[in-house]
Image (tube, helix red, strand yellow):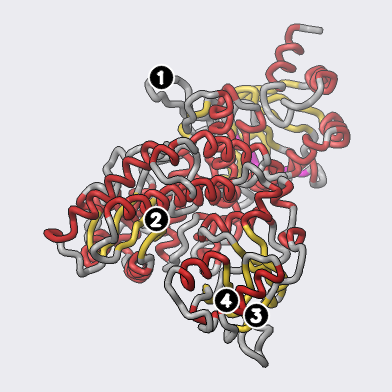
Amino acid sequence: MQIEILEIRDHLSRFVPFADLPEDSLNLIAGQIEVAYFKAGSDILQYGAPIHELHYVRSGAVEIYRRSGELHNRLSEGDIFGQVGLLRSNKVRFPARAIEDSLIYFIPAAVFAQLCQQHDAFAEFVEAEGQSRLKSAVESQGQASELIKLKVQALISREPVCVSSDTSVQLAAQVMTAESVSSLVITAPAPDNQNMVGILTDRDLRTRVLAAGLASGSPVSQVMSPDPITIQSHDSVFAAMLCMLRHNIHHLPVVQQRRPIGLISLSDIIRYESQSSLYLVNAIFNQNSVEGLQSLLPDLRASFVRLVNEQATAQMIGSAMSGIGRAFCQRLLQLAEQELGAPPVPYCFMVNGSMARDEQLVVTDQDNALVLDDRFDPALHDEYFAQLAQFVSDGLAACGYSYCKGGIMASNRQWRQPLKQWRQYFSQWIEQPNPRTLLNSSIFFDLEGIYGQTELVDELKQLLAQKASSSPAFLAAMARNALNRTPPLGIFRNFVMETDGRQKHIINLKGRGTAPLTDLIRVHALACGSQAQNSLLRLDAISKTQLLQPEALDKLRYALEFLSKVRIQHQARAVSEGSEANNYIEPAQVSASERHNLKEAFQVLNHAQKFMRFRYPAQPGQKP
């Protein structure tokens, strides 16, 4: 084979959609390629002109335009264009112009048609625009594990055992014994006894009846858990697991059109998932020391790797890992209270950042704070809460959740304040934004109360949603702050590499990808007054407004899921190999198709940031 043809074939094999073609197909293409040279500024394709070749950029740079003359895309080495015209009556649909001296390979239409006919992946690639290709990549990554495919109704072995709310606790216990069940569904008294009003478990009988010395004739309405969390029968077992994780419950009523049809327990799921996240959470609450919790760190990593290997979605993995993180926090708080005694005033332990968004992974640090009742008196009470916060922070560090380098922890006196002070913080940050307070806002405005009086944090959520949405100056400042981290793309869609001191030619998937994406989604969510914390739920809230077009929202979803999944898979490989997990990838070490999809995802971020600059213009007195 001629040297020139070998060189052409080898170059094609480095880029999608040619990278996955067999060698004989690459030889076919290379043998029939024609080469053309275009000077900078010259037209390559004009709208409506006949087209009979697929165009491949061998070197240089090309701009693609819409029919209106608006810039559609910038292409560089390895990119293709002209495929839309070949697929639609052999007429140019998107004009092209060389913006640098460029060498272009021409692949004949007959060869193009043969490749489409013989290779489905090639056909799918050229028939799809960037968003569709990214969507396809996301969907192909999310092949469901058995737990995701399995429906909750498959776990139901019998109808729920029910008693009415006016039944005595003694009779309820007798029913549980006779039916060999550990929980009962509590219904309203006749004639409304089809409506579920509560749930009663063995634990309720122990803690609320026996331990409290309650009379056996008392009605179960006094000791049941009212308005229980439920799950639909058609939901997945994985969804049930996440529900139990998030709310730390062991029994979950299953409903069908609001009617209870069964009751599943922690043990039902563990039978299917002996190493599940729920199993780990159960183990966390059975530990009685920090050392015991620390011993579960290998199980935490194993659970993460298993979720990745089962190809759960990034959202599912983030929710599961956040649930595990909350369980560590909650158990440490319980142990702290056992050691220090009951708190002198009510409080809420607030988590921030990725745990609050249900997007935590295996590489993470602490972001937390204490919101205290307004009766808090520093002179009388702060010593207790300082010790509690330090106990929890040290315990989390021992369990793999490193200390926050910026000091965003409840052990820092600044972040251990009564509700009235937190209200002042939030109001001041919104009303008088500056670089320091904007940094605080980007952390604390992802917030969730996970222990204690959670309504204290709910008040802050309400305040935030109300004030932020009505403050254009704050939103503009937040938008400018969110633009500080840009995607790693050069002007021609080439990766811009960086170094972390140990590695060269890397991309920080978090710092240059998922983090700026969550930043801009947060700004839009605040603008529409949403109290959602998870990024995908925030996009759902935004979709109910006219803030972003449906197509733009879909692109953000696909880009976030893809970047998150690449980051997750990278970390899982490191954990499996026993090396230190991080957020850095080397593009040269990933496949050609993955590099292409990374570029598409970063391009989505790039366009979204440009729109955000336009949507939230700098206010008078602000720097543009």
Label 2 sits on residue: 446
Q: CA distance from mark 4 to mark 2?
A: 32 Å
In depth, the one of 165 and 513 nearer the eye is 165
Quick one: label 1, few (<14), some, or many (20+) residues within 10 Å? few
Q: Look at the numbered discs 4 and 1 and tell me whether their residues touch, using CB distance below 8 Å.
A: no
Q: Cα distance, mark 4 to mark 3?
A: 10 Å
Q: Main secondary structure of the magenta part?
A: loop
Residue hosting label 4: 198
Q: Amino acid at mark 1?
A: Arg
Q: Earlier in the sequence, mark 3 or mark 1?
A: 3
What's the residue at 23%, 59% (across, down)?
417
**Residue located farthest toward the bottom when viewing the structure as drawn:** 191
Q: Nearer the viewer, mark 4 or mark 1?
A: 4
Q: Which mark is residue 502?
A: 1
Q: What residue is at 76 percent from the left and 21 percent from the top?
A: 34
Across and down, in percent, residue 64 comes to 61, 40
Whether residue 546 appears in this view of the structure is no
Mark 3 residue element: strand
Label 2 with label 3: CB-CB less than 8 Å: no
Mark sitting earlier along the chain (4/3): 3
CA–CA distance between discs 2 and 3?
A: 41 Å
Q: Which mark is residue 163?
A: 3
Question: What is the magenta range?
Answer: 91-97
Q: Name the front one of labels 4 and 3.
A: 3
> Label 3, label 1: how many angstroms apart (C-alpha)?
65 Å
Name the secondary structure under disc 2: loop
Q: Is residue 92 magenta?
A: yes
Coordinates of residue 391 in the picture (x, y in percent): 30, 45
Numbered marks: total: 4
Between the residue at mark 2 and the residue at mark 1, the CA separation in whole angstroms equals 32 Å
